[in-house]
Image (cartoon, helix red, strand yellow):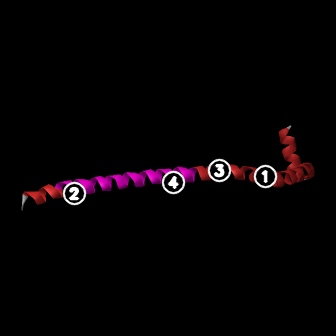
């Protein structure tokens, strides 16, 4: 094998190695940027959904809270009238 062919293969192999390394580094850089972009988008989406969640909670919590306040005294009264409820009430005193 002539010396000139060896002298040509070594720099060519080094060039291919450098190109492969650069390509891998560029791919990792792009993956990291894409990951940060997706994370930022997820945070923004969640931030935008918080007011909707608050509205939903307000819609469901307040009417049910009023119903609970109306039912609780009636339930306590029914327990007091029931024999088991009287026994429990006397145990609490």
| Residue 57: numbered disc | 1
Q: Tell me the CA gap for discs 1 and 4.
A: 34 Å
Residue visible at 74% across and 52% down in the picture: 53
Residue 20: in magenta span: yes
Closer to the chain start, of discs 1 and 2, is 2
Please identify the residue farthest to the left as the structure is shown: 1
**Vertical arrangement, residue 1 with respect to residue 49, above or below:** below
Q: Earlier in the sequence, mark 4 or mark 2?
A: 2
Q: Nearer the viewer, mark 4 or mark 2?
A: 2
Please state the horizontal and vertical placement of residue 50, each as a whole percent of the image.
72, 50
SS class of the residue under badge 4?
helix
Q: Quadrant of residue 5?
A: bottom left
Along the polypeptide, which appears first: circle 3 or circle 1?
3
**Residue drawn at (31%, 55%), measured in percent from left and top?**
19
Q: Which residue is mark 2?
A: 12
Which residue does the numbered mark 4 point to in the structure image?
Answer: 34
Residue at the disc numbered 3:
44
Q: Secondary structure at mark 1?
A: helix
Check disc 2 and report its element: helix, strand or loop: helix
The image shows residue 67 at horizontal and vertical percentages of 89, 53
Depth check: give the residue in front, 6 or 56. Answer: 6
Q: CA distance from mark 4 to mark 3?
A: 15 Å
* Residue lying farthest to the top in this orientation: 93
């Amino acid at each position: 094998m002539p010396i000139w062919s060896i002298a040509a293969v070594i720099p060519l192999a080094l060039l291919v190695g450098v190109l492969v390394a650069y390509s891998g580094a560029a791919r990792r850089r792009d993956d990291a940027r894409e990951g940060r972009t997706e994370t930022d988008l997820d945070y923004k989406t969640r931030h935008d959904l918080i007011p909707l969640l608050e509205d939903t909670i307000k819609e469901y919590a307040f009417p049910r809270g009023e119903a609970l306040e109306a039912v609780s005294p009636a339930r306590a009264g029914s327990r007091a009238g029931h024999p088991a409820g009287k026994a429990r009430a006397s145990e609490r005193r």
